[in-house]
Amino acid sequence: MKKNYRKLLLPAAILSSLVLAGCSEKKDCEIPTSHVHKYTKKITDNITITKYLKEEYASFWNYDWNPEYFEITKDDEKFYSFSRNLFKASDNWDYLYALMKSKRDFLEFYYRYTTTETYTETDSEGNHHVRTRTVTHSGWTDDARHRHNTGEVRLGHHRYYSFYVEYHDGKYYKKRSPLVDDIREVLEEYPYTEENCYDIVYDYFNYFPSHLPYLQPEQFDSFQQPDLNNSSIYLDSNKVLKK
């Protein structure tokens, strides 16, 4: 894959491994002017992610080369180099809608228990002594019937973000949006995003452990859900996303 060797200053061995890991053979492209090609990544039979890259590899980071292209200026080259990990939301709304549809609220249950373990200790004279110690095991599980559940419950919810790309002082920068329940809330101001464009937030509750198997995420109203009944990229039909 193409890298700016002067800026990265990585050892040749590392650069070589990056090339082998992310890219395939080059395509024969005879377009003389500066341009970017369309690259696509298949997510499902019906959904792909599309982005435009200034590359000529048959496959680049699991995105496949397409002969479709458009010409760019030398200044544009800097932008496409900077934004190669991003894609334009308006070109990939089917993917973003499917992503929100797949990320449902979920419940996790906190467990905690102790065990007694033996270990061998060697003293300064080389003698071995068998000792015991108490070890605490704890964490979160999706098993509502875990025998050591404490009754503490957390409700997990996905919130989404996208990016605005700005240019100043000769460099590009990306600014992440606030987290929102429906990514359409920020796409007008933050039009670029990435594949896993979400964080998980939680709300916490306490119940008797015997009640846990009967809990369902739909019983809680801690979080607002995205409007999945509206499959359009527009939350407000009177507004149009910036192109």
Image: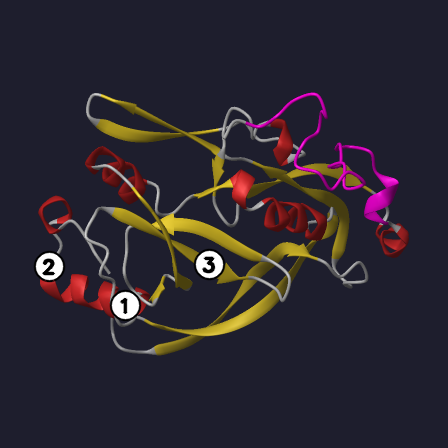
Residue under the image location 75 percent in, 55 percent down:
149
Residue 54 is situated, as x and y percent measured from the top left of the image, at 28, 50
Q: Main secondary structure of the magenta part?
A: loop
Residue 234 is situated, as x and y percent measured from the top left of the image, at 67, 31
Residue 175 is left or right of residue 75, and the answer is: right
| Label 3, label 2: how far apart the Cα atoms are | 30 Å
| Tag 3 secondary structure | strand
Residue under the image location 85 percent in, 49 percent down:
216
Q: Which mark is residue 11?
A: 2
Q: Amino acid at mark 3?
A: Thr
Classify 158 as above or below 164: below
| 2 or 1: tag closer to the N-terminus | 2
Q: Which residues are magenta?
A: 216-241
Assign the N terminus to one quadrant of the image: bottom left
Is residue 222 covered in magenta? yes
The residue under label 3 is 40
| Tag 1 secondary structure | loop
Q: Amino acid at mark 1?
A: Lys
Q: Amino acid at mark 2?
A: Pro
Image quadrant in which you'd find residue 55: bottom left
Q: Which mark is residue 27?
A: 1
